[in-house]
């Protein structure tokens, strides 16, 4: 299979933007003599051929302005010196390399330029460019009337190629990485060979001088990583460029005129790249393991300190926090008295020796070292691997019939976590490989994947690793720029088409790469290569994650191709799932920060931003722009009128003015033409998202409508469980404190088993910034782990409650809850202490007994009851899983619970119970909050009444409300329909 190249309009726009720079200029070939500096003169009389431009900066600037006007880019004020340099911005995955390679051939066709140098920042990108040159050769031959061109990778051991570059009359393309010519010191031992005049192959001529004589057109790929030092800038200048074109997705240096912009927002809006879906695995924190992870060690002249990640108790919750430790610190006290840290003891020693940083404790563990992992991390990684495989297989069900092979990429930072080798070079599968195979085998056996074409391919043939190897052929950890990495990049590039080709015995597609669908790669190999059919990217990083979010998504942003090598556009096919080691919200905000750090400005207005707005045409038909002067007038006016804040961001006043068509403009701007106000308003709307600013009328009412089509199926199933009424009798009997407290423990104690939570959201990229949509959250893989080492519960409770051992033993025994202690000791102890202390303060409700009668709640009230609310406390329902088109909520907790129900696919139906659904109690009617029908992991159905009033902690509720809730629970127990009554503020905790 060969990848096909389409004629894409946006790519041709970028090419034309480069070509138009030279309009109106006189361009010729230049001839120069190659003279030998040595007496024998072996090269004397040879001629070199170069580019020659009679540059007129005024004409060139006029060209640039017309280009910028057409592309909606603020106008530049001058052409850079000593040679022109221009920025072209193209988002990763949109064909940047293809564009500048075709631009080279178009520049030759239009103006006769023949000498081109492509400067890249790394070995990885150099290999990527060479691969694209190879893949496009036949395409360009057909497109460019068989134009003859020669491309080569600069190699200091092959200097005759530099001589051929200078002498050739054909199109010459040299690809060179900046490291090969950034050292130009006088001492030959410290300078790159390209600057030396003692090389025999060129008889004393410096290679750099030959290149400079050609006056090449220079293409800089990723300039933010190429000429980011003074030495690198001097190196580019030493090439003596006629013009330099700088191609990047993230230009840090914006002083050069921008000719074309296809940023992340434009690429996303026009579906030129995959949309990004971010998922993450989160594990509930319970504090039962003495988790300590060493993050760093710092040494000064007077002290040595260490920063660790550990559990800390705070306000009844246990969270991971970064804590600084010094010699003598007690871990139990540092954790705010979490009992599991008692066995760790105190800090005996801290080592800051580079490469051997550790902390020594008086207890267990005796030593922890930098980047040490624990079982919690392993469970999360297992979850990441499992969900990546599941996402992969689900996409195969959809995309394989379209001829699209699905690939998944795992980044790891240690090769030995995936595979190792014994003394006989026999490969040994390590942790990640073992986890992958176990999870793959478990998932692939499911009935829903029975139709997959590659289901029967053995598991050990569907995954493999791309790693750099040592001299013995053994994979090793590298930094991404070594000689070993260079060969790895070559292998990745060589296998590109095979990886895209499906395994098919009938067609002879039986290569190892054809069977491969899951790729493990070292995290150092993070740039310069990609594959259009990577649909999942999972980062299994133990140490600090050095791969930027842009580098992660960059490996799979390109539009997918089918078995004919043709692009298959559209977000219905092209969704890249990033399995992040953080929440999707953190990923989205972190990605936006990376864009901003790289120069992308979301929703920011600058004084030159309006300069390219077209206000008319001149007598020659050329467009007239608003210009920099009037742009600054408009910008300052908007700041003075509080449309913009001090940072240039749009305000609520601007949002309201745009929405109500009340935008004020300075008089001199309004006088330009009659349509200028509409033109500027449209321009502002494109940059500023008014929906993100709260300008809505809070008095606006919403009429809540019943969805009649929803009152069937799952609704009736749930309604049958809750529709029955009861009557109650009171049986009052005074109880001693111990018995009353034991009853409270038995009913209210909730000891949750640690489980994993799968969160996912689609990333939407706008001019105003990133945001996540289509968010979902589902629990999975609940752990039934019991803890073998348990703390001294009685001593702990004595300290927390000030009660005697005898009293505590009676309460615990009579509560019948000790069975939960081993499942989660720390949570159990904290909850018991809280409930006992609450029982000392609050009166206990008298006993109430309920009995089911023959009455039922009227289902017809759902239709006849008229509801209305305000937009500020009504949540729109998106499907038929609830009886009304809006959920009315009375608190943030209720709103968040409703949002969780909307996002969770396991929720088959849910009802915010209306005000007429009341349970009679001795203290007045009780209105439960929610009824929920839940399908647990696609299997058994569960029915719940969920109480979310404010808190799950009983003492936080008013005594009367608490009594009503307890009565309500007894009511639903009495109707005996299999419905469970739970008090929770979060849906995930009722699984």
Image: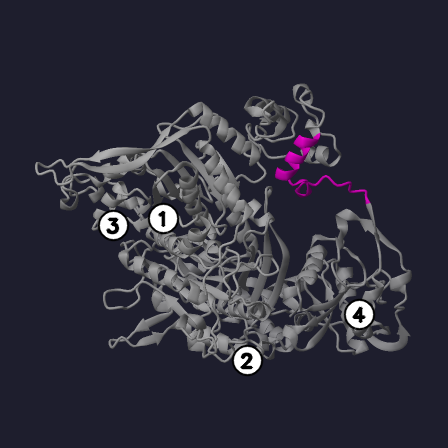
| Label drawn at residue 155 | 3
The span from disc 2 to disc 1 (Cα, nearest Å) is 54 Å
Of labels 3 and 1, earlier in sequence is: 1
| Secondary structure of the residue carrying numbered label 1 | loop
Residue 195: % across, % down: 21, 39
Point out the frontmost of discs 1 and 4.
1
Label 4 belongs to which residue?
715
Q: Which quadrant holds residue 625?
A: top right
The span from disc 3 to disc 2 (Cα, nearest Å) is 51 Å
Point out the frontmost of discs 2 and 1.
1
Q: Does the magenta-highlighted stretch encompass residue 807?
A: no
What color scheme is it?
one colour
Of labels 4 and 2, earlier in sequence is: 2
Dot 3 crowding, Cα within 10 Å, few <14, some 14–19, many 20+: some
Label 1 belongs to which residue?
148
Of labels 3 and 2, earlier in sequence is: 3
Dot 4 crowding, Cα within 10 Å, few <14, some 14–19, many 20+: many
Point out the frontmost of discs 4 and 2.
2
Label 2 belongs to which residue?
445
Residue for point 26% across, 64% down = 470
Dot 2 crowding, Cα within 10 Å, few <14, some 14–19, many 20+: few
| Secondary structure of the residue carrying numbered label 2 | loop
Q: Is residue 846 visible?
A: no
């Amino acid at each position: 299979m060969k990848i096909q190249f389409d004629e894409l309009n946006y790519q041709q726009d970028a090419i034309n933007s480069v070509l138009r720079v030279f309009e109106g200029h006189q361009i010729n070939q230049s001839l120069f003599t190659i003279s030998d500096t040595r007496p024998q003169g072996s090269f004397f009389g040879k001629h070199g051929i170069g580019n020659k431009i009679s540059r007129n900066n005024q004409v060139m600037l006029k060209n640039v302005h017309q280009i910028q006007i057409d592309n909606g880019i603020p106008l530049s004020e001058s052409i850079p010196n000593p040679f022109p340099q221009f920025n072209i911005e193209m988002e990763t995955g949109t064909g940047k390399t293809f564009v500048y390679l075709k631009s080279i051939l178009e520049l030759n066709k239009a103006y006769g330029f023949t000498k081109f140098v492509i400067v890249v920042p790394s070995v990885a990108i150099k290999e990527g460019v060479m691969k694209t040159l190879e893949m496009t050769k036949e395409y360009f031959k057909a497109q460019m009337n068989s134009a003859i061109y020669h491309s080569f990778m600069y190699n200091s051991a092959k200097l005759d190629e530099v001589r051929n570059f200078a002498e050739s009359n054909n199109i010459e393309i040299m690809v060179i990485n900046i490291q090969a010519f950034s050292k130009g010191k006088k001492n030959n031992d410290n300078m790159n060979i390209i600057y030396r005049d003692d090389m025999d192959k060129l008889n004393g001529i410096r290679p750099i001088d030959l290149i400079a004589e050609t006056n090449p057109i220079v293409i800089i790929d990723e300039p933010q990583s190429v000429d980011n030092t003074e030495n690198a800038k001097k190196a580019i200048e030493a090439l003596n460029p006629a013009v330099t074109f700088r191609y990047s997705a993230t230009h840090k240096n914006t002083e050069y005129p921008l000719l074309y912009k296809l940023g992340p927002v434009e690429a996303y809006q026009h579906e030129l790249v995959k949309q990004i879906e971010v998922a993450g695995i989160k594990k509930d924190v319970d504090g039962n393991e003495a988790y300590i992870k060493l993050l760093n060690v710092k040494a000064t002249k007077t002290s040595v300190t260490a920063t660790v990640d550990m559990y800390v108790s705070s306000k009844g919750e246990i969270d991971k926090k970064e804590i600084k430790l010094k010699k003598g610190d007690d871990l139990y006290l540092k954790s705010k008295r979490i009992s599991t840290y008692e066995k760790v003891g105190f800090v005996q020693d801290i080592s800051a020796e580079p490469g051997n940083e550790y902390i020594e404790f008086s207890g267990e563990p005796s030593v922890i070292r930098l980047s040490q992992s624990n079982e919690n991390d392993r469970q999360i990684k297992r979850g990441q691997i499992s969900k990546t495989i599941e996402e992969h297989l689900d996409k195969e069900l959809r995309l394989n019939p379209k001829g699209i092979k699905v690939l998944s990429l795992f980044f790891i930072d240690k090769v030995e976590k995936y595979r190792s080798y014994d003394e006989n070079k026999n490969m040994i599968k390590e942790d990640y490989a073992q986890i992958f195979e176990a999870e793959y085998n478990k998932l692939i056996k499911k009935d829903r994947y029975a139709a997959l074409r590659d289901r029967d391919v053995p598991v050990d043939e569907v995954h493999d690793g791309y790693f750099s190897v040592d001299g013995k052929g053994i994979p090793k950890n590298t930094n991404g720029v070594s000689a070993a990495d260079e060969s790895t990049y070559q292998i990745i590039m060589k296998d590109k088409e095979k990886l895209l080709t499906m395994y098919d015995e009938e067609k002879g597609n039986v290569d190892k790469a054809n069977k491969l669908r899951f790729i493990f790669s070292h995290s150092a190999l993070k740039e310069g290569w990609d594959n259009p059919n990577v649909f999942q990217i999972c980062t299994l990083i133990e140490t600090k994650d050095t791969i930027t979010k842009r580098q992660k998504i960059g490996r799979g942003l390109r539009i997918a191709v089918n078995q004919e090598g043709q692009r298959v556009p559209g977000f219905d096919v092209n969704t890249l799932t990033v399995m992040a080691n953080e929440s999707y919200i953190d990923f989205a905000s972190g990605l936006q920060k990376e864009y901003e750090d790289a120069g992308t400005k979301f929703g920011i207005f600058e004084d030159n931003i309006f300069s390219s707005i077209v206000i008319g045409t001149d007598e020659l038909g050329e467009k007239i722009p608003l210009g920099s002067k009037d742009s600054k007038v408009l910008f300052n006016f908007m700041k003075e009128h509080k449309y913009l804040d001090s940072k240039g961001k749009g305000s609520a006043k601007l949002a309201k003015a745009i929405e109500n068509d009340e935008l004020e403009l300075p008089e001199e701007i309004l006088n330009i033409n009659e349509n200028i106000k509409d033109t500027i308003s449209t321009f502002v709307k494109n940059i500023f998202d008014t929906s993100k600013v709260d300008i809505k009328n809070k008095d606006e009412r919403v009429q809540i409508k019943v969805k009649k089509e929803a009152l069937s199926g799952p609704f009736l199933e749930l309604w049958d469980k809750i529709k029955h009424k009861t009557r109650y009798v009171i049986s009052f009997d005074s109880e001693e404190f111990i018995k009353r407290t034991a009853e409270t423990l038995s009913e209210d104690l909730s000891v949750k088993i640690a489980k994993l939570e799968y969160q996912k959201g689609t990333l939407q990229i706008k001019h105003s910034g990133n945001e996540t949509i289509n968010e979902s959250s589902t629990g999975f893989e609940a752990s039934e782990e019991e803890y073998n080492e348990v703390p001294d519960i009685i001593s702990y409770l004595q300290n927390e409650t000030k009660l005697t051992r005898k009293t505590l033993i009676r309460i615990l025994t009579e509560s019948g809850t000790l069975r939960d202690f081993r499942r989660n000791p720390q949570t159990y102890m904290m909850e018991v202490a809280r409930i006992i202390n609450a029982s000392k303060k609050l009166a206990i409700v008298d006993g109430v007994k309920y009995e089911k009668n023959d009455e039922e709640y009227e289902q017809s009230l759902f239709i006849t009851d008229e509801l209305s609310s305000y937009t500020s406390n009504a949540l729109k329902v998106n499907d038929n899983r609830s009886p009304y088109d809006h959920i009315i909520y009375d608190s943030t907790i209720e709103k968040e619970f409703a949002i969780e129900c909307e996002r969770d696919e396991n929720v088959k139906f849910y009802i915010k119970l209306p005000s007429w659904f009341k349970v009679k109690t001795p203290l007045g009617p009780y209105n439960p909050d929610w009824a929920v029908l839940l399908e647990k992991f696609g299997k058994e159905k569960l029915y719940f009444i969920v109480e979310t009033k404010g808190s799950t902690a009983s003492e936080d509720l008013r005594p009367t409300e608490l009594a009503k809730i307890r009565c309500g629970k007894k009511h639903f127990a009495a109707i005996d329909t299999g419905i469970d009554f739970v008090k929770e503020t979060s849906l995930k905790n009722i699984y």
